[in-house]
Structure formats: C-alpha cells, structure tokens
Amino acid sequence: MFYREAGQFKTSYDKDQAVFPIMQDRWFIVAVILAAYFVVPFVADEYWLQAVIIPFLILALAAIGLNILTGYAGQVSLGTGAFMAIGAYACYKLTTNIPDLNIVVAFLISGLMAAAVGIVFGIPSLRIKGFYLAVATLAAQFFVLWLFNKVGWFYNDNPSGTITAPPRELFGVTITGPRATAEARYFVSLTFLVIGAVVAKNLVRGRLGRSWMAIRDMDIAAEIIGIRPLQTKLMAFAVSSFYCGVAGALYIFCWLGSAETEAFDLLQVSFPVLFMIIIGGLGSIIGSIMGAAFITVMPIFLTNFPPMIGIHMATDLQKHIEEIIFGGMIVFFLIAEPHGFARLWQIGKEKLRRWPFPY
Amino acid sequence: MPEPMNETTKDTMTAERMFGDVLLDVDGISISFGGVKALDGVSFNVREHEVLAIIGPNGAGKSSMLNCINGFYHPQEGTITFKGSPHHQMQTHEAASQGIARTFQNIALFKGMSTLDNIMTGRSLKMKKNFLWQALYFGPALKEELEHRAKAEEIIDFLEIEAIRKTPVGKLPYGLQKRVELGRALAAEPDLLLLDEPMAGMNHEEKEDMCRYILDVNDEFGTTIVLIEHDMSVVMDISDRVVVLDYGKKLADGTPDEVRANQDVIDAYLGVSHDENGNGDE
C-alpha cells in the first residue's frame, strides 16, 4: 500500500536515469545510511562490530571490486586474495617507511599499487577467457602470496613474518592499531564502503560501465562499435584491483590488526568473495553488499542458532555441520535463484508495487 | 513480383536521386582462408547517399566483404579507400571512429543490457569525459550523459521502440532485436552503414517495416548504406545499385534492372526459374 509510485512523474532524463528513481527507495537508502552512521555503533557491542559488521563492510568493498571485474566486465578472477594482499602489504610498507603519511592517503596509494599489479595480471585476458582466465588469475594468487612470504623486505624482515598495523590517527582519533576502538574502525570501514559503492555505481552506469558490459556480452560487436577490448578489460582489472587493494589494506589496518599472508589465502578470501558476488548477484552493486552480508553473517548464525534452541554438541562436530549446511545453502540458492539477491530484491519490489493484487 | 510497376517507380526514383562523390572504394580485394579463396580481386565503389546491395549465393563472399570493409578481416591483397584515405588494413576501432557502423547476420546485441543501454553503447566513441568525471557522475559528465541520452531517445523514437527502452534485449522477440541492432548502429551517426541480412528470418510486415527504416535512414540522415540481402524483391526495390558476387568474384555491378538482365547473374543466381516467370525479355 505504501510502496506506490503513482504521481511520481519523471520529467527529465536526469530523473529517469537516477539510481533510485522511486521516491520510497531513495528514502529507504537514506534511512539505511543514517542508521548505519547514527544507530548501529551505539546499539552494536564490541563483539558484533569486531566479529560481524566490520568484516562485512570490508569484504563488501572487495566484493564490489570483484563484481566490477567478473559481474560487469565478464572476466572471471580467483585472484581477489592476492590483490587484497598487495593492498595490505603496500599499506604496511607505506606506513612504516613514511610515518607522517596520512592514513587515508596510504590506503588510496595501496589501492593504486594493487591496480598496477592488477593491470599486469589482466594482460592475459585479451587472449584467454572463462575458466582459463580464472586459472591465470590463480597464478597471481599463488605467486603474490609466495612472494610476500619469501622476500623479507615486504614484512620489514621481522622474525615472526607478520605485518602489524601501526597506530595512526585521523582527525585526532586513533583508527588503526591495537588501541583503536571498534567504533572508530567501523566508521572508517563504513565510509570507505559508502563512497566506494557510490563511485562504483557511477562508473557502471556511465560510458565505462556500458563498455564493460558490452565486452562481457558480445566482445566482437563491442569491438566493431569502437570499444577497444584491451584498454577496456585492463581498466576493469585496474578498478577492480583498486577496490580489492583498499579492502585489503582495511582488512589488516581496521580489522585484523596483524596478519600473515595466510589471511589472504584462496580459501580464506578469494573463494568467499566470489561466492558473495554469485549469491548477491553478478553485475549488481547492491547485490555485492547483500551477498557479503549473507556470507559473513551466515556462519555466525549457524554457530549461535543450535545453542539457542537447546541443541548442544561438540565444537568440532558443530563446525563440520555448519560447513555442510553452508555449502548446501549455497547450492540450493544457486538452483533456486541463479541471479542472486539482487534479482530477489527486484522481484520483491515488483510484488510490493502490486500488493495486494497478484498480477 | 509485380515487375512493370517496379520499373517505373525505380526509374523515377533514380532520376530524382542525387549521389555525391565516391565514399568507399574497394580495389582488388583478395582474402583466402587456407585453400579457400573467399574473395578474389573484388573491386567496386559506393557513392555518398547510395543504397548498394551485395547479393550472391551462399558462400559467395558477401559477409567476408563486409568484414574486410569494417576491419574485422584483413585482406591479403587490395586496398580500401574510405573518404579518400586509402587503407591496406583497417583496424575495427579505426573503422568505427571514421564512421563505419554495421549490423550482423546473427544478432550481436549485448543481451544483458537494456535497449537504451545498447543504443547508448553505440555512442561510446562520441563520449569524451574521462574516468574521474565518470566516477563523479556530476557536472560536465552528467551533462554529457544527458546529451547523449537525448540523442539515443531520438533514435528510439525513429525506430518506434519507445515501449521497450528499459527491457533487456535478450527478452525481446527476434524482429525487435534486429531493430535494436539497427538502432545501435545508427547511434554512432555513421557515414557508412553496413547491414548484413537485415531482413533474415522476418515475416512480411517486419520486412516492410525494416525497408521503411532503411530508406528513411538513407533519406533523412543521408547515410550511405551497403546491405546484404537474400530476398530479391527487397533488394530490387530498395537498392540503387547491386553488386553480384559468386565464388569470391564479382559477376555484375549495376542498377537492379541491369543486374536482372545480366545473363551471368541469371545463370549463377536467379537460375532457371527466370524464364518460367517470363521476366527474360527486358
């Protein structure tokens, strides 16, 4: 009843191509963002912020990055972990070597470094497609992590082989390192995600995004229109890796605090982020965020749900059952709705518009 | 086919129509794939504002010819002169930026994108704002986007596809997809439009619509058109000149009437049915 667009006339192309052309959607998004800034940090406790919400925000940023590459430009990548690791290690080297550098600038430069490496690993995409390209990006994954383990320079030769986020301040508030509060780290991650999502949406609805989708859907026709495949694909790799790089830097500096290369392992990061965009919806920015929420929240839910209804079991057994259910849900979801949450969201809105009528 | 009627309309048309200079000159193009000579020393030219049809039996090299013109194939011999500048080999993006657009025999639309986005993609080369402006989607970038949207809407109006502008093209019926593909080619505001079997698989009404659009494009925008078509009545009706290919060689080149009267063409293409229909005494 309340979700009606009657009386909302679009009188200009500007209004017609707005991201949220329906007024109710605009208010909904504004409400969500306001709640994220002014309600969540005061309601959620330290555990929730640290265990669920911050990793969700950071992985959502990485998922947007991968969705640009895989969902929009159609280039399958399994190298997300590598590009995040490059961002993290670049940020570590920057902050330890140049202590005065503003931390936000350090994050952005880390993203640019990841973008540069992403371009290099994107070059094979001109010749190979699909699964073969996925294998080529897998090479990036293994090579980069091996390099960061092998060469001491990347972790400043410290004996433990880990990188640790040094404390840095922004506007007088410590946002990284052990003394930074969960709230501060939450605000930083949230702000990066909001800006990242807006910029990504702008890119994909403009000329560049259309070129990416054209390459994805029919590369020969795109070429004949005058879209140059190599430049367009490398641009997708660069933008995607930039997002992953920034996410990687945040991953260490605003979430884990310190980590080894294992934190960016194929099974730790690359696959889960790929699942996020598949479940959330390929070629959808909001889908990336919804998919990230699902993948980060679901394991926590599965851990806490059995005790809540009075089932207690051994931890290892519980862990295994959790993984089985999780895998099963992904398979079920892909069969039931192959276009992911983004599609469900669309269907839900359609249904809501017509409610209470079935047609 | 109502033969005499055609003749009179055709004659009055050609008398009125004014053609400009030679826009595209194809000179001695040869290309072979392994042992197969797809094109063997084919030469012809297209003048500004002309509608030129390339006909020929299957495998005659018609599509290969279009592929050479827009740089998708690189001919082994010969030169292609477009707007006075000769090219031995054309790159596809070069051809696009010089004003050559085309449609495909099998529809090559971007299936996941809406009709509007497909047409907007056709304008990619005309959009100049750089990456950072696009990321902001504000000020000059927004202005540019809206300007091009207005142009795209003109094409949507022209092709009468307003109702489907937000529909993903993968869901559209075949005839409409063909129309959207024409729209995408038109979006680039080409000087030369290459149409590869624009009417294949269409019913009679759709064919008539498509003919109307092709003639309107030619008339209103002054676009030069080179088309491949198997439907002889369509070819004879809408083209100013016909080039006949067979086994990679040019058999004939002339007005529809000349081509129809050419004995080589009759033998190779129109076949024995020609005499039975009583069209032979021209």
Image (tube, rainbow, N blue to C red):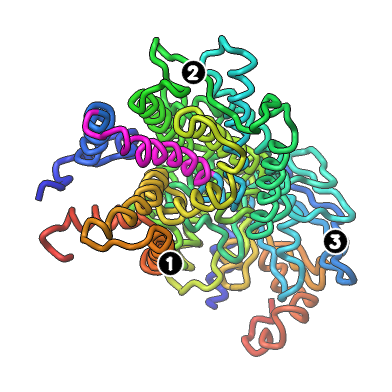
Camera-nearest label, 1 or 2: 2
Task: Tell whether label 2 touches label 3 (CB within 8 Å).
Answer: no
Residue under the point 59% across and 43% down:
A262
Check disc 3 and report the residue beneath it.
B31
Residue B80 versus residue B172: which sits nearer the camera? Answer: B172
Residue B208 versus residue A260: which sits nearer the camera? Answer: A260
Camera-nearest label, 3 or 2: 2
Principal secondary structure, stretch drawn in magenta: helix
Check disc 2 and report the residue beneath it.
A167
Q: Residues within 10 Å of mark 2 (few under 14, many from 20)?
A: some
Letter of the chain that mark 2 sits on in the rendering: A
**Tally of numbered discs:** 3
For residue A350, which quarter of the picture?
A: bottom left
What's drawn in magenta, residue-wise? A42-68
Amino acid type at circle 1 is Val
Q: Quadrant of the C terminus of chain A?
A: bottom left
Give the answer, above or below, for where A60 lies relative to B112. Answer: above
